[in-house]
Image (spheres, rainbow, N blue to C red):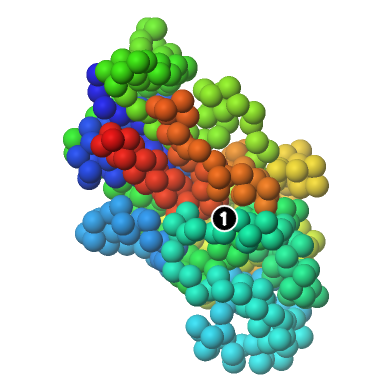
Amino acid sequence: MSDVAIIGGGLPGLAAARTLRNAGVRCTLFEASDQLGGRARSQHFGDITVDNGFQLLNSWYPSLKELLSNGEYAALNQCNFESGFQTHTSQGQVFIGDPVRTPRLLGELLSKNSRSAMSFRDIMGLRKWFGSELSHRSSLEMRKISEKRRAKDSKVCESLDKSGVTRQMRTAAADPAMRAFLLDTDGETSAITAKWVFATLLRGAPTVPAQGMGDVANLLGRNNGVITETNARVTALKTNPGNSTESAGVTLHFGEHDRTETFRYVVLALPQKMEAELLDRPVLPARGMETFWFVSDEPIGKRPVITVDGTGRTPVASVAELTAAAPSYAPGRHLIQGTVAFGGSQRALQPGAIPNEVEMRRYMGEILDVPTSGWELVTRQRITDVFPVLTPERAAQSAKEDLVVDGGVILAGAQHATPSIDGALRSGQRAAQKVIELVGS
């Protein structure tokens, strides 16, 4: 009987496989599709590269640096957007960043247009909301958050209210940022989680690999010694507690040819809907995103920046020219993404209300203040379950969650971590470490 199986070849599964391999634990990775990476993959339309929905790395993320060698990490050739984000207001465009870390912002904040749209007091009020979060330098999964602090956690909308983050800073910056970076259109996310996610924007810079997000999966998937099977869909699993180490295990049933295999331990690294089906658990409400990709012969702006709609007049979560940061995404042309967040609650935008191509083109033109008649649609993508809604109650439950099911199944995935690529990778590392402990016991 093999030692360990990993079900799912997305980032959590790849992180688990590499961690186990580095510890000398034999494992087999099963992926239902024909390629590894899960959401972290790229499509090619001629010489144009688009990722599977708008995705960002962050130059600060520690987990990716731990998993890749220095040479592998450098090979990503990460291309930076500016640290922070730009918001479109009725008074003009305003860049939101940390003025303490980025002194040049002080001059912008004191400009006439910026003063009318966002005051320095507003910016510092948001910094006060962060509290001690800006001083931390670790993934949220690596911290021991006290039960007392968990008990005081609240929805991010309530936390912002309590801290006095209202007025223009709220409507033009905080709320649009929640839509852009958490896909949260109703403010229900745990404030502890939201502060961590937003702080990463100030600690590091949003980046994309020069050749697309698929390169992250390609590098993580280079695991000599790990047996990898694609087109291997696990349709059922059964735990066998047994009366001894030799007889215990987990039997996997595959869709093809009534095939079964038994492993001592199984890391379940699937999206939450697939995980729920295998474990016969309820499916949690999830947030989704729809991304429109356009290409233009003309540049969109002078700076590589992510822009949000601070007017509240459109359903657009974020707009960005990928080629302003990474020209290799569309050599000689300009690739622009526009993303809409939907789902998660009854108050959120529903799938039926997602704009069509004509509407989206108009909205993006308004936000960027550029003509869009020459834009060509490359593709549009809808992802319905990017990650579950992480309310304060759900975050508290997740913190206490036993990731070992029936002694042999260990859970990984973004639904067990912070809603970020760092969280997805950490969940795989954490599951692997638990396996290592169990194997050695």
- Residue 145 versus residue 238 in the image, above or below: below
Residue visible at 80% across and 42% down in the picture: 346
Q: Position of residue 150 (x, y in %)?
A: 63, 57
The residue to which callout 1 is attached is 337
Residue 149 picture quarter: bottom right
221 and 404: which is toward the camera: 404
Farthest residue in the front direction? Answer: 243
Q: Amino acid at mark 1?
A: Gln
Residue visible at 25% across and 23% down in the picture: 2
Residue 288 picture quarter: top right
Q: Position of residue 249 (x, y in %)?
A: 35, 20
Residue visible at 75% across and 53% down in the picture: 186
Task: Please identify the quadrant where the N terminus is shown.
Answer: top left
The reply to whether residue 144 is in sight is: yes
Q: Exactly how many numbered labels are in the figure?
A: 1
- Residue 8 versus residue 73 in the image, above or below: above
Q: Position of residue 165 (x, y in %)?
A: 75, 73
384 and 421: which is toward the camera: 421
Side of 148 where 312 appears, left or right: right
